[in-house]
Image: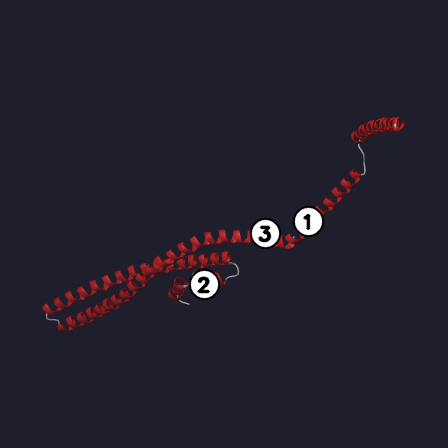
Amino acid sequence: MSIFSRLSDIINSNINALLDKAEDPEKMVRLIIQEMEEALVEVRSTSARAIAERKELERRCEWHESEANEWERKAEVAVRKGRDDLAKGALVERNKSTEAVGTISKELTLLDDTLEKLSSDVGALQAKIKDAKARQNAIIVRGQAAKSRLGVRRQLSEHNVDDAMQRFELYERKMDDLEGEIEAYDMGQKTLSDEIGELDSDEDIDGELDELKVRMSASEDEQGRNEATH
């Protein structure tokens, strides 16, 4: 795969789509960033080599231009000296140098286009890396929160809340039963205060009974006297 094809795939890739398909988004985003950074190193190395090659081509182009001018001068000298044969040879060499300049110029044009494309890709790739790193932090936070929620859910699943509430209600009913037994036991027991209160009540009843007997005896005596009089 060429560097341009690989960069195109990376730059045009949809990070969200990749993360949605990943079983471990946190791991996936790390791999994406790693691949992008490796591609960035590679494209910068390619750019450095292209720049060095451009400088070399420029030097060769300048040398051939200088050679073409020199052979042009030599051809003129030969013409002035009446040596057309030498002038022709000089012109042939000049043409070779001129053709070399044309070839190198085309190479330089292609190389400039390549460098421009690499520069554009570097900018796009850096923006992509920055975006991925920003998403990485958010994904890590989301992942940690999700793991925490999952842990809580698992604990709740392992220790069923409904079962726990049922056990709690069972304990409450047992306590109600126990308290009921205590109250029932207390109902059959008399305290010292209760017994003394009952004695007071008995004394009152005895007094009232004595008063009733006195009133009845007085009433009977009066009735007997009245009958004797008549």
Residue 185 vs 229, above or below: the answer is below
**Sequence-wise first label, 1 or 2:** 2
**Sequence-wise first label, 3 or 1:** 3
Q: Is residue 114 left or right of residue 178?
A: left
Q: According to the image, label 3 marks what residue?
A: 152
**Sequence-wise first label, 3 or 2:** 2
Query: Does residue 20 show up?
Result: yes
Relative image position of residue 90 (x, y in whole percent): 18, 69
Relative image position of residue 216 (x, y in whole percent): 85, 29
Q: At label 3, which amino acid type do we have?
A: Val
Query: In this view, which residue lies farthest toward the front?
Result: 230
Relative image position of residue 225 (x, y in whole percent): 88, 26
Of residue 98 and residue 6, the one placed in the foreground of this image is 6
Q: At label 2, which amino acid type do we have?
A: Ala
Q: At label 1, which amino acid type do we have?
A: Glu
Q: According to the image, label 1 marks what residue?
A: 169
